[in-house]
Image: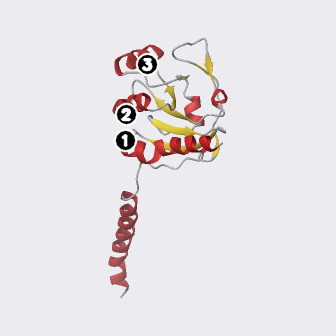
């Protein structure tokens, strides 16, 4: 009987690996957990792309709910989501901060001139340190920061219409409803 076990052991190992692989394939890779959810957004102070003599800090937006979109001109996924961001900027009054990540400022300006600029503010994270503080896995990534400066949502990868309509926009609708009650 030990000979049978000798031949069955690899089968059991294979089946165990297959089960874990099957479970992994059912997970959504865009739903990467973030340690920042329900915690204060990391603070920073960076020069702005449109006016390098003017700095931006998240503290500037305390009391307002806003979107932080991490992007770069070299990012293929950013090209995919950019038309959706332009549409959102035209159809809503959401404050959109575009964190330009590890990018050449000249290339970033050219990219926005060609594709449109949905951002209210564009801080430049040339070194990538702010991205590291936010736990950026890779661009694009999008965060929603609430009125108290707390991260309440993170989307990894290019935004989709579904993600925008079912997850992102309701967070801003909820905020507007709460403000109307006050």
Residue 84: give its label.
2
Q: Residue at x 41, y 49 (%)?
A: 29
Residue under label 3: 108
Numbered disc 2: secondary structure: helix
The image position of residue 81, as x and y in percent, is: 37, 34
What is the distance, in whole Å, between disc 3 and disc 1 at their CAs?
22 Å
The image position of residue 43, as x and y in percent, is: 66, 32
What is the distance, in whole Å, between disc 2 and disc 1 at their CAs?
8 Å
Determine contact: label 3, label 2, CB under 8 Å. no
Rate crowding at label 1 as few (under 14), some (14 to 19) or many (20 or more) other CA atoms within 10 Å: some
Q: Is residue 174 above or below residue 6?
A: above
Numbered disc 3: secondary structure: helix
Determine contact: label 2, label 1, CB under 8 Å. yes
Residue under label 1: 160
Would residue 66 be seen by someone viewing this image from the given angle? yes
Q: Is residue 17 above or below residue 38?
A: below
User: What is the quadrant of residue 75 in the picture?
Assistant: top left
User: What is the quadrant of residue 174 in the picture?
Assistant: top right
Q: Quadrant of the N terminus?
A: bottom left
User: What is the quadrant of residue 41 in the picture?
Assistant: top right
Rate crowding at label 3 as few (under 14), some (14 to 19) or many (20 or more) other CA atoms within 10 Å: some
Q: Nearer the viewer, residue 118 or 132?
A: 118
Instruction: For marks 3 and 1, give the one nearer the viewer.
Output: 1
């Amino acid at each position: 009987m030990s000979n049978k076990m000798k031949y069955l052991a690899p089968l059991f190992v294979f089946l165990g690996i297959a089960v874990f692989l099957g479970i992994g394939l059912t997970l959504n890779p865009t739903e990467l957990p973030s340690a920042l959810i329900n915690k204060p957004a990391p603070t920073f102070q960076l020069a702005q792309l449109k006016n390098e003599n003017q700095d931006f800090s998240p503290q500037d937006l305390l009391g307002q709910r806003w979107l932080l979109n991490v992007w770069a001109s070299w990012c293929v996924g950013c090209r995919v989501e950019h038309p959706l961001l332009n549409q959102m900027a035209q159809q809503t009054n959401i404050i959109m901060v575009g964190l330009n990540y590890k990018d050449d400022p000249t290339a970033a300006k050219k990219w926005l001139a060609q594709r449109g600029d949905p951002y209210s503010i564009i801080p430049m994270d040339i070194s990538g340190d702010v991205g590291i503080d936010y736990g950026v896995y890779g661009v694009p990534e999008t965060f929603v920061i609430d009125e108290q400066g707390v991260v309440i949502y993170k989307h990894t990868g290019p935004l989709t219409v579904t993600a925008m309509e079912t997850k992102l926009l309701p967070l801003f609708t909820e905020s507007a409803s709460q403000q109307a009650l006050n």
